Image (tube, rainbow, N blue to C red):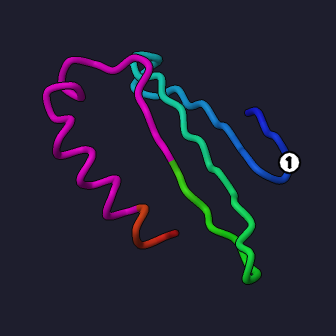
Amino acid sequence: MEAEAPRRIVERNVSAGGRRLAGGTYTIETLPTGGSRISFAYAWVRAPLADRLLALVVRATMRRANGRVM
């Protein structure tokens, strides 16, 4: 994990027995009216063929999941 406090957090994850390598970046922006805006970007560095073929479905699923938790 890498961080640039208090503005950016970068995480890397490995799954699928090491076949899937991905990373996510949280960017925190202080708002002039108070509070913060948090954005999240997720990208595969390496993924199994099945994941790449289902990328549109996976993106939609991640978008919905992130919309609920963010």
Q: Residues within 10 Å of mark 1 (few under 14, many from 20)?
A: few
41 left or right of 62 in image: right
Residue at image position (56%, 31%) is 13
Residue 46: within the magenta? yes
What stretch of residues is rendered in magenta?
Answer: 41-65
- Quadrant of the image containing the N terminus: top right
Residue at image position (67%, 37%) is 10
Task: Please identify the quarter of the rendering in which residue 11 is found.
Answer: top right
Q: Residue 33, image x and y in percent? A: 73, 83
Question: Residue farthest to the bottom?
Answer: 33
Classify mark 1: helix, strand or loop: loop
Task: Please identify the quarter of the rendering in which residue 4 is found.
Answer: top right
Q: Residue 18, image x and y in percent? A: 47, 17
Up-down: is 11 above or below 36?
above
Residue at image position (34%, 53%) is 62
Residue closest to the eye, 53 or 30? 30
State the residue position of label 1. 5
Question: Residue farthest to the right?
Answer: 5
Residue at image position (69%, 60%) is 29
Give the residue type at disc 1.
Ala
Residue closest to the eye, 18 or 1? 1
27 left or right of 21 in image: right
Up-down: is 35 above or below 20?
below
Residue 49: within the magenta? yes
Q: Main secondary structure of the magenta part?
A: helix
Up-down: is 15 above or below 11?
above
Q: How many marks overall?
A: 1
Question: Residue farthest to the front?
Answer: 32
15 left or right of 56 in image: right
Q: Residue 57, image x and y in percent? A: 17, 46
